Image (tube, rainbow, N blue to C red):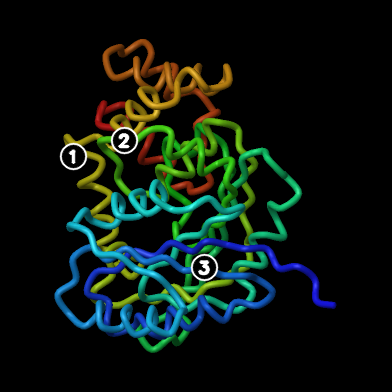
Amino acid sequence: MEPIKEKVLVLMSTYNGEQYLQQQIDSIITQKNIDVELIVRDDGSTDKTIDILKDYQQKGLLSYYVGENLKPQYSFLHLLRHAPKCNYYAFADQDDVWLEDKLSSGIKEISSYGNQPALYTCQTQMTNQYLEKIPTPQLHPICTFGESLVYAYASGCTMVFNNALRTIITSYQPSFIDMHDWWIVSVAAAMKAHIVFDHNAHILYRQHSKNVKGLNDTKLKEWKQRKKRLLHKQQIRYHIALELYKGYYALFPQESKELIDLFIISKKSFKHRLHLLMDSRYKCGDKKTWVLFKLSILLNTY
């Protein structure tokens, strides 16, 4: 008698993804030792994406719906809010390829936490458009709340999380987020959820010219973007912190309250910015990001 397979609800957002979509769907529905349900929200495609989704739906391999163009971060949160209840959830981009043990690896790491909120994420293996492996930055996150306010280390396409965390996330609808993955790992860390980072890659993270957000930038372009973020008036980190404060502060454990209070009040107080600058609880696993964050504190542009 075969053991009962855990069910995972996979949520995918698509937008003009006809080129690689079929390969990605096939890698999801053929996951080993997992009962997969795939729900797709199309974000207003004008190519053949809908035709592809319709074909898979007619075969009973997924369900999909079409919505207004929200952009990926809000499209994924829309999916999560409207998804049926399931023990486990995962996000999927439209252009990657999953190794057959991707979901089972995640479930193995967080299944023991039961009704406690838990999040799994992992290293990616970057590839070119032909799925040929290319050099990939190796991540070494600390997985603390302080780090999550500074550093977006978790890719949504690697995440597996349980219903307890989903319930917390969907209890508040933010008006501003940068990307859904940064938002989710920040909420999880703030609420002291169990966060597991797997240093093994279980996904081929395809880099191509149409990536919404990828890691295929040249060093020069990367540093130009870092400089722009450093000097930019949008101050993404600060506005994410404000959203976290508005949405979940009453539920925060004491340390998370202390960290978010200092992060927010420092915008208007040089004395507090000095405390923020010296507080090691915000340290992150990426040295470049950590140094640039300190500079952004001095410039008050975080």
Among all residues in the image, which is located at the extreme right? Answer: 1
First along the sequence among labels 2 and 3: 3
User: Dot 2: within a 10 Å radius of its alpha carbon, few (fewer than 14), some, or many (20 or more) residues?
Assistant: some
Calculate the distance from the C-alpha at mark 1 to the C-alpha at mark 3: 41 Å
Residue holding disc 3: 37
Q: Quadrant of residue 290?
A: top left
From where the camera sits, is residue 295 visible?
Answer: no
Local SS, label 3: strand
Residue holding disc 2: 174
Local SS, label 1: loop
Q: Amino acid at mark 1?
A: His
In the rendered structure, find residue 92 and report the number of the disc placed on it. none
Give the percent coordinates (x, y) of residue 233: 17, 34
User: As rendered, which of 199 and 65 lies closer to the eye?
Assistant: 65
User: As rendered, which of 45 and 83 lies closer to the eye?
Assistant: 83
User: As rendered, which of 228 and 74 lies closer to the eye?
Assistant: 74
- Of the two numbered discs 2 and 3 in the rendering, the one whose residue sits closer to the viewer: 3
The quadrant of the image that shows the C terminus is: top left
Calculate the distance from the C-alpha at mark 2 to the C-alpha at mark 1: 22 Å
The residue under the point 46% across, 68% down is 38
Residue holding disc 1: 232
- Of the two numbered discs 2 and 1 in the rendering, the one whose residue sits closer to the viewer: 2
